[in-house]
Image (spheres, helix red, strand yellow):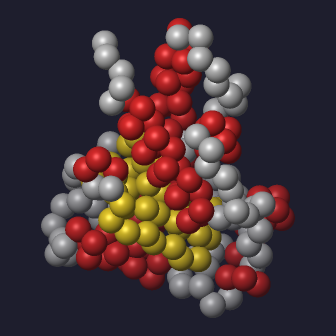
Amino acid sequence: MYYLIIDLEMSGTEAGYHDIIQIGAVLAGENWSQLGEFETLVYPDNEETFNSYAAAVHGISLHDLQEAPSSYEALEAFENWIRKTLRRRQGEPLTDVVICGQSVLNDVNFLEYKFDDLNLDWPFARRILDLVSLTMLFYSIFDNNRRSRPKSYSLDAVAGMFGIGRSEATHNALEDARITYRCFQKYFEMAKGFRL
């Protein structure tokens, strides 16, 4: 089993209308050992949908994307990086790769839409691991054991609970993927100490 921890920055909130403009990922193996990292900017297919609200969140302007690869080139490079890291040839399945992230379903929706839009075959299984869902479970355990925990389910709150800080004020896909990866690591280390 492999874990692909992803974070995307987008030009807005609607898959199919807005575009992916940055991909950040960490690939991990068994026991959450890191195998590699990936990051790329992506030039939007529909630059007219690029909005200022999204730019304020991630700090990426349309000008910053002028030299970025197209969405096709970026997704091809992304899949090739996974295949190279796992030593898989083109066409071999990646169904043992679980896609992970913070509120990851939104990222998966954007990725799936773009794969479909570009007539690329979706190589992954339909299995995801969401940090928010895992956090809900752990917060319930903490509450039942009268252990303090944050009130928020945000990535910053969970990371703060583990003493993991952010180096940038705006959201960067690779930094968010790294932080999410470390939070998953911490939860799974913590789970080893539990007995049912």
All told, the count of numbered labels is: 0
Whether residue 11 is visible? yes
Any part of residue 118 in sight: no
Residue 118 location (% of width, % of height): 42, 71
Q: Quadrant of residue 42?
A: bottom right
**Residue displayed at 59% across by 85% down:** 68
Q: Considering only vertical position in the picture, is 77 above or below 34?
A: below
2 sits left or right of 55 in the view: left
Return the x and y of residue 110 as percentages of the image width and height.
52, 56
Q: Quadrant of residue 78?
A: bottom left
Q: Name the residue nearer the viewer: 37 or 61.
A: 37
Question: Where does the image place residue 115, in percent across and percent down from the top left?
Answer: 41, 65
Q: Nearer the viewer, residue 120 or 104?
A: 104
In front here: 131 or 21? 131
Residue 130 as seen in the image, left or right of residue 188: right
Residue drawn 53% across the image and 82% down it: 70
Relative image position of residue 84 (x, y in whole percent):
26, 76
The C terminus - image quarter: top left
Residue visible at 54% across and 34% down in the picture: 132
Examine the rendered structure and indicate whether residue 131 appears above or below residue 20. Answer: above
> Measured along the vertical axis of the image, is residue 8 above or below residue 195?
below
Residue at 70% across / 25% down in the picture? 151
Relative side of 11 to 118, left or right: right
**Residue lying at the far bottom of the rendered structure:** 67
Front in this rendered view, residue 54 or 147: 147
